[in-house]
Amino acid sequence: MGDIASKVDKAYGDKSIAELADAPVDALHSVSEGDAQHLKDAFNIKTVRDLGTNKYFLWAQAITKLAD
């Protein structure tokens, strides 16, 4: 991932990895509050950690890697 600061909004650029994991999803670069609300409504995803550990996203990643 290299430069993590470039993957998050500027307000989160100086946060630790642990703080980023527990930050709201819209802390990620280009994820809007509206996007975050859709993720919450659809999958109960509230934090970056929730997004990264969501079983549906993990299943999709595994299927994609196996397909390659």
Image (tube, rainbow, N blue to C red):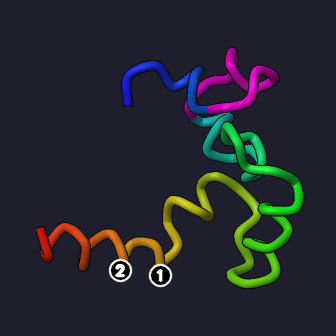
Q: Is residue 18 left or right of residue 24?
A: left
**Quadrant in the picture for the C terminus:** bottom left
* Numbered disc 2: secondary structure: helix
Identity of the residue furthest to the top in this view: 14
**Quadrant in the picture for the N terminus:** top left
Q: Is residue 15 left or right of residue 3?
A: right
Q: Name the residue at 57% across, 31% down.
A: 7
* In the depicted structure, whether residue 54 falls above or below residue 33: below
State the extent of the magenta-drawn residues as a range. Answer: 8-17
Q: Distance between the residues labelled 1 and 2?
A: 5 Å
Q: Mark 2 points at which residue?
A: 59
Where residue 4 appears, as percent x and y from the top left, is 51, 25
Q: Are marks 1 and 2 in contact (CB under 8 Å)?
A: yes
* In the depicted structure, whether residue 42 falls above or below residue 9: below
Is residue 32 on the magenta stretch?
no
**Residue type beneath disc 2:** Trp
* Numbered disc 1: secondary structure: helix
**Residue type beneath disc 1:** Tyr
Which quadrant would residue 46 be assigned to in this image? bottom right
Q: Name the residue at 88% across, 54% down.
A: 33
Residue 37: numbered disc: none
Where residue 45 appears, as percent x and y from the top left, is 70, 70
Q: Name the residue at 80% across, 73% down.
A: 38
Q: Name the residue under label 1.
A: 56
Mark 1 surroundings: few (<14), some (14-19) or many (≥20) residues within 10 A: few
Where residue 52 appears, as percent x and y from the top left, is 51, 59
Q: Name the residue at 59% across, 36% down.
A: 18
Would you say the magenta stretch is mainly helix, strand or loop?
loop
Where residue 31 appears, as percent x and y from the top left, is 73, 49
